[in-house]
Image (cartoon, rainbow, N blue to C red):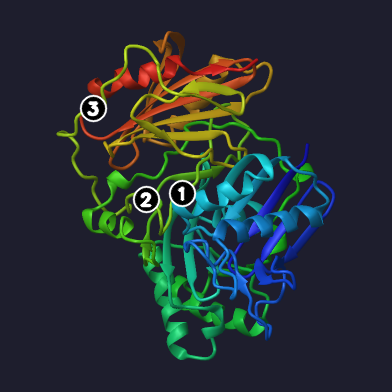
Amino acid sequence: MSRVDLVLTDTRIWARGPATHWDAPPSIVLGSNGNLVVGESLNPPTQVSSAVQFVPAERIALLPRVPAVPEALTAVFGTALENLGVGVPCERITLVCPTEWGGRRRAVLDAAARRFAHDVVFEEIAARAVTVDDGTARSRRTVVLEFGAITTTATAVTRSHLGVQVEACEHEPNLALADLGADQRALDTLTGLIARLLDGRPADVVQAVGVSDPVKLDLIAAAVQQSCGPDAELRPISGGELVRGAHQEPEYRPEAAPALPTNEWLQPLRERAAAQAPDRPVAKYVLAGVAVIAVIAAVVGGVVVAGGSDETTTAAPTSTTAAAATTTPAPVPPPHPTGAQETVGRIRFKVPDGWRLAPPSGQNGGRVDLSPQDGARYRMTLVQTPVAPNAGYEQIAANLEAQMKTKPSIGDLRRDVVFGGRSGLSYVERPEGSTVQWHVLVEHGIQVSIGCQYVGNTWNGFEPTCENFASSVHVIP
């Protein structure tokens, strides 16, 4: 079965399948018989709208019809797969979305894409842009600029032993690429946006996604020099460079210490309130510690997707201190795993009662996160990655020990630890403001990492819940 890559922006969709590629505006317009026609220019004399731009809404006004957004997205995805010559349902659709997008918008895309694929996974444009551009390989920090129809997003991305990580993200809801050159204030706004994002930290490379106009690039370069210094390199990257077919996907290699999901409960109260407000542009998102793709041939690891402006689970800025959680009661664990059984990839597990499961994330859909429905400040993470046939616990342990020498937040490696009824490795990761107890198993060529994340001194109350969950995890041979 086929795999498809779709890169989505307000103004363009790029698609690649096993044999060919296609791109067009993600537009919809009423056909002569009232059906939705996809791919018309967004600036014709007729009535036309971007289905991607309207994802936060419920319906799109194309009078006399007012189609629902899922119908519009279904038309866009169906047209893309038809032009790729891919039969449906295909094996997997990877949706590469604007970096500031969070759970609500992604859920809308997920529902529409699952009409055409058995599996749907998400990546961020910023992470993908850095991953595919060899010019960022030695950059200490890369700034990725994404220009929407009327908005601009700036994202700081770093590389580490965890791979490509989204460090921070800023969103400007009232700055369009077309504004640059037409209004001096627009250039000042872009300069300020990058400066706020970096907050004094260095950046060696700035990528401008989807920008090819030399005049616009010169203006962006001027903003980059003011905010990043004269040595920063501006690199335009086209949407076509962001898509890769299934036959082009690199082998998925696990690495150590899966990065943590974003954590609403690590935010300051002001940003939490903003994140929980009705879906509207918000100027500040910091998505700390989000690893998106492995870059080393190690034997442990995972990938995650960060949240955005419309998600209630965004991570803490690196400059803030996590809120105390000593008074949060731990979820009461069941005596045995009794929740709904789920299968993701080659992993089968049960969702504990009172917990919710987020859609699989990452390049290969190898990661899932679970969180309490009552909003308690805990999270369980399950990461599955294929390993070499001869990979064993000692090899994984040696890799972890090597990485602990350069990453002080990882430590306390132990062997032969029984957790959830099975013996494996365990280690502790202490990202800013929280603790994660990781337990690693290797079965049937799959390495399984189970992370139990909490804040404060609440592990004793949380441990039974996480161990019961771990006991329900099984690798399908």
Quarter of the rendering occupied by the C terminus:
top right
Q: Are marks 3 and 1 in contact (CB under 8 Å)?
A: no
Between 239 and 281, which is closer to the camera in this rendering?
281
Q: How many badges with numbers are in the image?
A: 3
Task: Read off the residue under disc 2.
Answer: 314
Image position, residue 185 (x, y; %):
42, 87
Of the image marks 3 and 2, the number of the one nearer the N terminus: 2
Instruction: Report helix, strand or loop for mark 1.
Output: loop
Task: Read off the residue under disc 1.
Answer: 306
Q: Quarter of the image holding residue 12?
A: bottom right
Q: Residues within 10 Å of mark 3 (few under 14, many from 20)?
A: many
Task: Read off the residue under disc 3.
Answer: 330
Q: Given the image, on which type of amino acid does mark 2 rest?
A: Thr
Between 49 and 91, which is closer to the camera in this rendering?
49
Between 390 and 349, which is closer to the camera in this rendering?
349
Query: How far apart in space, not on screen, are marks 3 and 2 (Cα)?
Result: 21 Å
Image position, residue 30 (x, y; %):
68, 72
Q: Given the image, on which type of amino acid does mark 3 rest?
A: Ala
Query: How far apart in space, not on screen, are marks 2 and 1 (Cα)?
Result: 7 Å
Query: How far apart in space, not on screen, are marks 3 and 1 (Cα)?
Result: 25 Å
Position of residue 135 relative to residue 230, above or below, is above
Image position, residue 269 (x, y; %):
22, 54
Instruction: Report helix, strand or loop for mark 3.
Output: loop
Q: Is residue 137 visible?
A: no
Position of residue 65 relative to residue 320, above or below, is below
Between 438 and 29, which is closer to the camera in this rendering?
29
**Label of residue 202 in the image:** none
Of the image marks 2 and 1, the number of the one nearer the N terminus: 1
